[in-house]
Amino acid sequence: MKSSLLYLGLCILSLGSALPEPASNNQASANAVKRLVFDCADGQVGDTCLNMCYGAKCKRLGTTLTWDHPNYTNQGKRSRLAGCGSGNRCSKPPYGAGYQCDEFPFKSVKEAEKGNQVNRCVKRHYNSRQGGVLRQFYYSNGNFKGKGCDGKAPCKFSLSFKNFNKYGYCKKGGSCTNDGNEYTKAGPAKREEEVDASGYYRLGSGDVIYVPDGAAVGDLVYKAKFTNSNGTMIADVATPTDDDDEIDDDDEFDVEEDTIVEEVEDYE
Ligand SMILES: *[C@@H]1O[C@H](CO)[C@@H](O)[C@H](O)[C@H]1NC(C)=O
Ligand SMILES: *[C@@H]1O[C@H](CO)[C@@H](O)[C@H](O)[C@H]1NC(C)=O
């Protein structure tokens, strides 16, 4: 989005006259990236936050993703590339029943084609919640009605995180040491050279979000929050360990729209 702002700036310059302040602000927000905010509080999307942050920040895979509406064959190929094919490590001790292999970037996005994805064994329920938010966003269903991708691929979007405090991978300057559950297809994942481009941003509502590769004032965000924060108890019991991330029908979440208003230097 930095490059699109730069482009916008060049356009304005090449017009030879600066646009009045309000008009240029409008323009900037019309071009702003759509950003999904995953809630990392207890009882929300659990360890999937760790995997997304580890991948985005520690493996420097970034948060800008492109949903390309892949078919099942393609999704399967991406899962295998991520180390999440059938018989993956999450189906075996110390994981096994109730766990699934969560991949980042997701198999639903083009960025997964490049390989080098990270995977993490997470409770099935968390994987299904993450998948449910993404799916409703892609198809503009449920609380994403009128927002999201409207079923039209390719669709570019970004990620960010709320209530990230207890997760080191989701913090500016936080440790990128592998906690033992971050893998690539090749084996335990290693962090990339540490260049921390991440930042904290305050939203219009006052919430602060974490963005592993930075964001811009004016970015639109969609905050997804599950309404039954202890729903995990029910769904984690004796479930298959395949890689389907179907969301449970009764697992509902709200979506709130918000906007980035400023960068915050420090946040604890
Ligand atoms: C799935 O998508 C890939 C890539 O776009 C394409 O090459 C392939 O033919 C598709 N397969 C099926 C069964 O539609
Ligand atoms: C969630 O937890 C609250 C308080 O701990 C309890 O009253 C409620 O019944 C629980 N809901 C479910 C669906 O387990």
Image (spheres, rainbow, N blue to C red):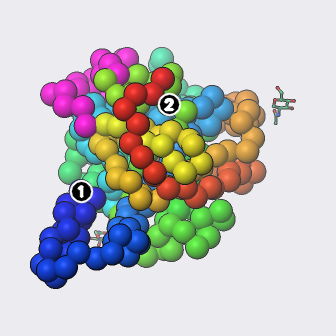
C-alpha distance separating marks 2 and 1: 24 Å
Identify residue for label 2. Answer: 164
Sequence-earlier tag: 2 or 1: 1
**Quadrant of res 23:** bottom left
Residue 91 at least partly seen: no
Q: Which residues are magenta?
A: 174-197
Q: Where in the figure is residue 179, as x and y percent of width and height?
A: 37, 17
Q: Amino acid at mark 1?
A: Lys
Q: How many marks?
A: 2
Residue 104: x %, y % from top left: 36, 43
Coordinates of residue 255 in the picture (x, y in percent): 63, 55
> Badge 1, how many Cα within 10 Å: few under 14, some, many 20+?
few
State yes or no: residue 105 in magenta.
no
Where residue 2 is drawn, which disc sits there? 1
The structure residue drawn at horizontal position 50% and vertical position 39%, both measured from the top left corner, is: 208
Q: Is mark 1 within 8 Å of ligand 1?
A: no
Q: In the image, 127: left or right of 28?
A: right
Compared with residue 201, is residue 123 higher up or lower down, i.e. above or below? above
**Is the residue marked 2 within 8 Å of ligand 2, measured from its CB?**
no
Q: Main secondary structure of the magenta part?
A: loop
Q: Nearer the viewer, residue 138 or 80?
A: 138
Residue type beneath disc 2:
Phe
**On screen, residue 136 above or below 187:** below
Q: Secondary structure at mark 2?
A: loop
Residue 257, horizontal then vertical, whole percent: 58, 58
